[in-house]
Amino acid sequence: EEAEELHIELTKVEEEINTLRQVLSAKERHASELKRKLGLRPLDEFKQNLTKSWQDVQTSNAYLSASATLDDIAHSEAYKKTQETLSQAGQKTSAALNTMSSAITKRLGDMRNSATFKSFEDKVGNLKYKVVGPRGNGEAVSSPPDSTPTQENPPF
């Protein structure tokens, strides 16, 4: 008998919940329609909510405490020494990389002017001429004079 009463009460509560959901849905549609008539767009509402939330965060005790702690750290001797050391390390690293870059650039320039490289460059140029022919200078060719493969014009 008690279980039956609980089932009846549960049914009534679930019906009330469904009714409240329907009412809430209707109210949300009405609010949305009013906002549309007022010219309020969802993005504007989002911006307002975001601004309000950020203001709430900035005035919270946790934020104020963390901000004060970070301020204390930023003004500490350890922070200043670490900042100075990292700055010097960055400057030295930058100078080393510039020196290395200059050395590599000079070495590549020397290599490009070497007889071995020039010989290799000539061989690649000759190979290109043999494969592509005199029309391989970047100009587009509408169609080859003879489209049938021959000994001199193999199909690639």
Image (spheres, rainbow, N blue to C red):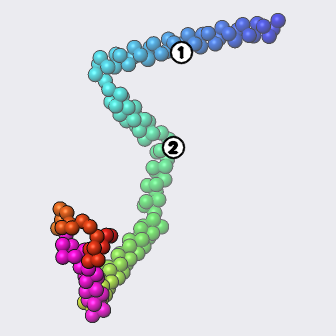
Task: Determine the secondary structure under disc 1.
Answer: helix
Q: Which residue is mark 1?
A: 21
Q: Quadrant of the C terminus?
A: bottom left
Name which residue type carries label 2.
Answer: Ala
Disc number for residue 51: none
Name which residue type carries label 1.
Answer: Arg
Residue 3 vs 136, above or below: the answer is above
Main SS of the magenta part reads helix
Nearest the eye: 105 or 56: 105
What residue range appears in magenta? 115-138
Q: From where the camera sits, is residue 153 visible?
A: yes
Q: Is residue 117 on the magenta stretch?
A: yes
Residue 60 vs 44, above or below: the answer is below
Q: Position of residue 10 (x, y in %)?
A: 69, 12
Q: Residue at x 25, y 82 (%)?
A: 125
Q: Residue at x 61, y 9 (%)?
A: 15
Residue 74 vs 127, above or below: the answer is above
Q: Which residue is mark 2?
A: 62
Q: Is residue 126 on the magenta stretch?
A: yes
| Residue 141 sits in quarter | bottom left
Q: Quadrant of the N terminus?
A: top right
Question: Is tag 2's residue or tag 1's residue first in the polypeptide sequence?
Answer: 1
Spatial separation of the CA atoms under disc 2 and disc 1: 36 Å
Q: From where the camera sits, is residue 88 visible?
A: no
Task: Determine the secondary structure under disc 2.
Answer: helix
Q: Residue at x 39, y 35 (%)?
A: 50
